[in-house]
Amino acid sequence: MAKQKLLIGFHAVTARLRQDAAGVTDVYVESARRDRRMQDFIRLAESLNVRLHPVDAERLRGMAGTDRHQGVVARAEDVALALNLDELLDGIEGTPLLLVLDGVTDPHNLGACLRVADGAGAHAVIAPKDRSVGLNTTVAKVASGAAETIPYITVTNLARTLRELAGTRHLGDRHCRRHGKNALRRGFQGPGCPGDGRRRRGMRRLTRETCDELVGIPMAGGVESLNVSVASGVCLYEAVRQRRLKR
């Protein structure tokens, strides 16, 4: 029997239904919720012949482990994504776009990073096995379906993995755009776009020393730094912009 996982919330469940409804075995919906959003969701699930189970809020809370389930929980088969970097790179034609996170321990941050990586068309998110959050129901909910589409690959030695990739860090040695395109040419048109995961410490020393290029995002206001998912979005979409211009 295929391994199953829980999907929580409208976004995560709807994204999986549209991607692979056959892999969704059961959907549980809050019977007391009758608003338009729920009715639209039920119609979608019924049109895809997915088994629906009306249950009370207490049952959903027990399944999800939280009150923030929006009235929707689903059981679905695990999606077969690349499990390691070699497997991933073997399946990519052209230049890969990878988001590398160092020290992201908050599941909400990881979920948001997966979502922005999916939106930018990244091939995977990579993180070290130590001092990083793993995939869980909170990550999947915040990712709004991206946890089902973007491989999340953990590596034992991040510095070794980064040898051929470029790096970014808060207040790095070069600023985006300020020093011209050459400052970002290798990092944003090359094989990767790593992102910083710890606001105050930045990337670890070995990670920084392994990067071909260090760049930073200029901060023109009063705040000292951006959230890791926001910074990841800035860098990923700059990478996409430069690659399109190059083509």
Image (cartoon, helix red, strand yellow):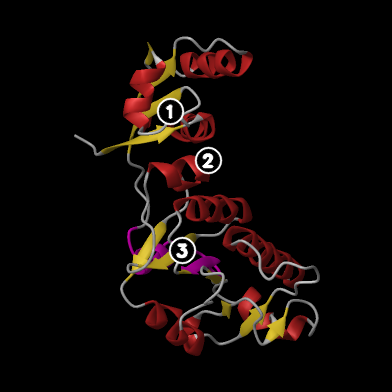
N-term-proximal mark, 3 vs 1: 1
Residue at numbered disc 3: 104
Residue at numbered disc 1: 21
Under circle 3, the secondary element is loop
- Residue found 34% across the figure and 20% down from its top: 59
Instruction: Name the image quarter holding residue 128.
Output: bottom left
In the rendered structure, does residue 143 fall within the stretch colored magenta? no
N-term-proximal mark, 3 vs 2: 3
Residue 220 place in picture, x, y as percent: 81, 71
Relative vertical location of residue 21 with respect to residue 100 in this rendering, above or below: above
Residue 247 place in picture, x, y as percent: 72, 69
- Residue found 54% across the figure and 19% down from its top: 41
Q: Nearer the viewer, residue 91 or 56?
A: 56
Q: Is residue 195 left or right of residue 210?
A: right
Disc number placed over residue 238 in the picture, else none: none
Residue 152 place in picture, x, y as percent: 41, 57
Q: What's drawn in magenta, residue-wise?
A: 83-101
Residue at numbered disc 2: 144
Disc 3 to disc 1, C-alpha distance: 31 Å
Check the image and name the residue furthest to the bottom: 209
Relative vertical location of residue 115 with respect to residue 4 in this rendering, above or below: below
